[in-house]
Amino acid sequence: MATTSVLPASAPLALPPFSGIPADKYRGAVVEDLQLPPAFTLFSNEEISRAIELAYDRDFSHIPVLDRNRRPLGYVDVARLKESWEARKADPSDKVVRYMTKFKRAVSEPYTLITPLSPLAELERFLQDNIFALVTDHDRKFVLAVATSQDLESFVSRRGF
């Protein structure tokens, strides 16, 4: 015969002891909640004249560079690219691959996967050591967006966290 125990209505509920770990300041929000615009990327064989034009049209400071299979290779720092352009060190027909910073790919530095469902706390940790994060699909086949510390700050100020 099964028995059940019932707590009296006046019995206080026991709360788990405080673990010392602060509550998630993002209240469980994920990268998708940032509502980032779709990623703007360049292929490695794109001319720098087009890269500069498109970057300023969209007001981007860093642009991911992809190979022909859409695999991220690195990024272009638009300010440095523009400096090279203005100093006449770069030819308008030069390819962006000449001016990009390559992503480090090594066993000692594993790839950090940031997807639309990654917690913002995880993104914040990643951005402590990186200028931006590429938001990709789970299989890392497509760059969906680029997230920065400024995106996190804007989210926090909009939400009043």
Image (cartoon, rainbow, N blue to C red):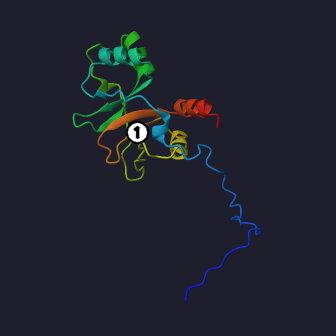
Decide which of 7, 154 is in the foreground and name it.
Answer: 7
Residue 117 horizontal side relative to residue 71, left or right: right
Q: Position of residue 5 (x, y in %)?
A: 65, 79
Name of the residue lying farthest toward the right: 10
Name of the residue lying farthest toward the bottom: 1
- Residue type highlighted by circle 1: Val
Q: Quadrant of the C terminus?
A: top right
Q: Residue at x 39, y 42 (%)?
A: 104
Q: Position of residue 15 (x, y in %)?
A: 70, 64
Q: Which image quarter: residue 77? A: top left
Q: Residues within 10 Å of mark 1 (few under 14, many from 20)?
A: many
Decide which of 44, 152 is in the foreground and name it.
Answer: 152
Residue 8 horizontal side relative to residue 57, left or right: right
Q: Which residue is mark 1?
A: 135
**Count of residue discs:** 1
Q: Position of residue 73 (x, y in %)?
A: 32, 36
Q: Which image quarter: residue 143? A: top left
User: In the rendered view, would you say 128 is above or below 43?
Assistant: below
Q: Quadrant of the N terminus?
A: bottom right
Q: Residue at x 41, y 28 (%)?
A: 37
Residue 131 appears anywhere in the view: no
Residue 135 horizontal side relative to residue 159, left or right: left
Q: Residue at x 42, y 52 (%)?
A: 108
User: In the rendered view, would you say 144 is above or below 13?
Assistant: above
Residue 107 horizontal side relative to residue 47, left or right: right
Q: Circle 1 sits in a helix, a strand or a loop, which is it?
A: strand
Q: Position of residue 85 (x, y in %)?
A: 37, 13
User: In the rendered view, would you say 83 is above or below 20?
Assistant: above
Q: Residue at x 56, y 85 (%)?
A: 2
Residue 117 appears anywhere in the view: yes
